[in-house]
Image (cartoon, rainbow, N blue to C red):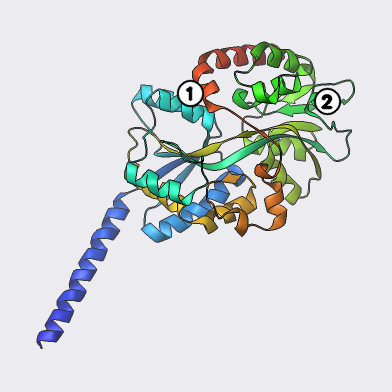
């Protein structure tokens, strides 16, 4: 009788503890900002849903499409933060926001866990790499495609309608390299050289896509013949039936990563998500099978088929974008970029 009473009490205590944990999880709601489209789908299926299953914390993912720095600044100014965490913010925007005190640093114990599970250099005080992007030239198979980055900016030798992703921290270094600035002396970027290079073909640029979905749409439809775009989005297009030629000459690596916004409504849930991501290499590998971008785990490459591993930016000779350059020069870069786009339309 005593044993039965003890067993009943123990069971009841366990149920109360479970109910308490479940209640706390139910009280949490992780709001994430994402690039949208296939990017959002890859995150939802391979990381967010497994995280929810493991923790009970639901994840709501908003299609935002970039422009992170301006959007976070606007939310801060309005006194209303909409998101807790950003899904693969570009490192330049992250560095800028961190310098403005708008990102939460990782707690010391969490950072130690992240570093133990990740490739050296992929974890900073406020970001762990996820979705690090190759910025490359791609062409539809039927068009004459340049074999070098300089050729993309030669409209006479390589005619055709173009698209260039509307991300100045990616495009300006790309254009400066194509214009002759040395790889090993790319930062600080020679902005005059970069804009002079862009001016050569601005009349041929049909679209300046502001999202990954738009990059894919204009190529798939044939609206443009070639583009400077993200390697994972281009790879996804090939898997969906649009044959493309990839040109890795002059390609850049733009580190992306998970960051937690300062003052996030549920930063504790955000930190739990970051830890889950870092400690589940198979989830990272499954994500990279959809979009072959760089991930943080030491184990990811060994978990990928050869075809996917070969499509990763790390399998090519790419120049890494310095996020501090963008953070330190964001105001000038944004001003000159907007003036250039206004003149290009």
Question: Is residue 4 placed above or below 283 in the rendered structure?
Answer: below
Residue at 20% from the left image edge and 66% from the top image edge: 16
In the rendered image, which quarter is residue 335 located in?
top right
Q: Is residue 28 left or right of residue 329?
A: left
User: Whole-percent x and y of residue 33?
Assistant: 48, 39
User: Whole-percent x and y of residue 128?
Assistant: 47, 41
Q: Nearer the viewer, residue 240 or 4?
A: 4
* Residue 240 at least partly seen: no
SS label for mark 1? helix
In the rendered image, which quarter is residue 66 located in?
top right
In the rendered image, which quarter is residue 334 located in?
top right
**Residue 325 circle label:** none
For mark 2, what is the residue? 151
Location of the N terminus by quadrant is bottom left
Earlier-in-chain disc, 2 versus 1:
1
* Residue 340 at least partly seen: yes
Q: Nearer the viewer, residue 314 or 170?
A: 314
Q: Residues within 10 Å of mark 2 (few under 14, many from 20)?
A: some
Q: Is residue 307 left or right of residue 52?
A: right
For mark 1, what is the residue? 70
């Amino acid at each position: 009788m005593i044993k039965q009473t003890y067993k009943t009490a123990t069971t009841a205590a366990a149920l109360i503890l479970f109910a308490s944990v479940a209640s706390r999880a139910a009280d949490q709601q992780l709001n994430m900002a994402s690039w949208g489209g296939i990017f959002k789908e890859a995150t939802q299926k391979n990381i967010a849903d497994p995280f929810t299953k493991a923790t009970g914390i639901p994840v709501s993912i908003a299609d935002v499409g970039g422009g992170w720095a301006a959007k976070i600044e606007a939310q801060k100014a309005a006194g209303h933060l909409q998101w807790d965490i950003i899904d693969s913010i570009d490192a330049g925007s992250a560095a800028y926001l961190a310098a403005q005190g708008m990102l939460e640093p990782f707690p010391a114990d969490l950072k130690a866990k992240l570093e133990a599970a990740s490739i050296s250099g992929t974890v900073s005080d406020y970001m762990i790499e996820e979705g690090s992007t190759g910025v490359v030239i791609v062409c539809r198979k039927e068009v004459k495609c340049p074999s070098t980055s300089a050729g993309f900016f030669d409209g006479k030798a390589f005619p055709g309608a173009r698209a260039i992703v509307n991300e100045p921290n990616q495009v300006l270094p790309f254009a400066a390299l194509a214009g002759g600035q040395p790889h090993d002396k790319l930062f600080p970027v020679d902005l005059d050289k970069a804009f002079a290079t862009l001016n050569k073909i601005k009349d041929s640029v049909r679209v300046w896509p502001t999202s990954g979905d738009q990059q894919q749409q204009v190529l798939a439809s044939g609206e443009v013949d070639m583009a400077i775009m993200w390697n994972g989005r281009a790879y996804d297009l090939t898997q969906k039936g649009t044959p493309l030629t990839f040109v890795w000459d002059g390609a850049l690596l733009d580190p992306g990563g998970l960051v937690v916004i300062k003052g996030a409504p549920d930063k504790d849930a955000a930190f739990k998500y970051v830890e889950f991501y870092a400690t589940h290499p198979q989830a990272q590998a499954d994500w990279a099978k959809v979009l072959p971008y760089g991930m943080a785990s030491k184990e990811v490459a060994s978990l990928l088929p050869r075809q996917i591993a070969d499509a990763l930016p790390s399998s090519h000779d790419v120049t890494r974008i310095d996020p501090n350059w963008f953070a330190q020069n964001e105001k000038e870069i944004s001003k000159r970029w907007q003036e250039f786009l206004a003149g290009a339309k």
